[in-house]
Amino acid sequence: IEKCVERATLIRENREYRENLENAKRVADRDMRMAVNVQKNYLPKKPPATPGWEVAFEFRPMAGVSGDFYDFYEKDGRLLGLSVFDVSGHGIASGLITMIAKSIVFRCFNGMRDIPLNTVMENINTELIAEIDNMDNYLTGVIVRMNDGTVDYVNAAHPGMLARAASGGDVEIVGAAEGYLNGRFLGISSLAGNYDLCVHRVATGDFLLLYSDCLIESMNSVNERYGIHRLMKRFGEADTGEPCKKIIQFILEDFYRFQGTDILTDDLTVILLKNIS
């Protein structure tokens, strides 16, 4: 009788355990779907259509909620600037931080138009530290501000922006020739400090390429990284007569071919701009 009672108890406890797991999974799936939908509505769905710049982008979360986020800043039909940021980690926690951070970046960029862009990044970092310093996440990111004939560029520990000149077609890492150094991570109080400003000259027909680290850090089956030099080579081979969207597809075709699959191991963001002024 005691053995039968023990067996019945174990069966009941096992059933309750399975039911609790299934219920927890239903709740987690519901929360993930909600987070995905909120984030989708929070990020730009299409590139800005402005007279001075042609813009295209590709955004692919690895799974569900993305730790990448991006934004475009416009006024009176002009593109004032853009940003790409990457929150460490994956999942709902990183996705929630993207929404907090995107609001901070938007407010600082638009509220500090007459302030040097590196100071804007420092203010962004101050606000991020106040919001997430007690968490395990940090951010990397790039902000670009458009001027007449130049762009201001500030990098916080993010992969370097690439530029391709209309004349000659050479591809370069913006600021590398001038010794520009990327700044430190964002959102960590112990790393708070100053950021450097890079001013890059752009001519009609020049391209700018921004991206998250998935594009250069992903590996193939023999543990070889795609890498910045392979990206620069592919970018330099693109037909500049094609629309920006086609050029992004041209780059990603090579990226997926290198990987041997189009399954991502990280969130992917790629933004390409062409100066058409």
Image (cartoon, rainbow, N blue to C red):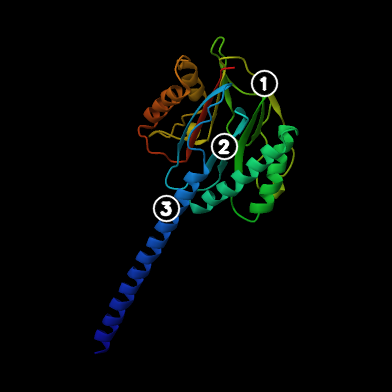
Compared to 79, does 128 lie above or below?
below
Compared to 7, does 138 lie above or below?
above
Where is residue 169 drawn, in percent x and y? 53, 13
Compared to 239, does 15 lie above or below?
below
Q: Nearer the viewer, residue 211 or 106?
A: 106
The residue labelled by disc 3 is: 33
The residue carrying pointer 2 sits among few (fewer than 14), some (14 to 19) or many (20 or more) residues within 10 Å by Cα, namely: many
The residue carrying pointer 3 sits among few (fewer than 14), some (14 to 19) or many (20 or more) residues within 10 Å by Cα, namely: some
- Tell me which numbered mark, 1 or 3, is placed earlier along the sequence: 3
**Quarter the N terminus occupies:** bottom left
Report whether 13 appears left or right of 119.
left
Question: What kind of element bears circle 1?
Answer: strand
The residue labelled by disc 2 is: 71
Q: Residue at horizontal 72%, vertical 44%? A: 192
Residue that protrudes farthest toward the front in the picture: 76
**Quarter the C terminus occupies:** top right
Q: Could you tell me if the residues under marks 2 and 3 are in contact, i.e. CB atoms within 8 Å?
A: no
Q: Nearer the viewer, residue 206 or 251?
A: 206
- Give the residue type at disc 2: Asp
Where is residue 178 drawn, in percent x and y? 69, 21
Q: Could one spot residue 209 in this view of the protein?
A: yes
Where is residue 109 drawn, in percent x and y? 67, 37
- Give the residue type at disc 1: Thr
The quadrant where residue 261 appears: top left
The residue labelled by disc 1 is: 150
Question: What kind of element bears circle 3?
Answer: helix
Q: Residue at horizontal 27%, vertical 86%? A: 5
Give the CA distance from mark 2 to mark 3. 22 Å
Q: Could one spot residue 188 in this view of the protein?
A: no
The quadrant where residue 248 appears: top left
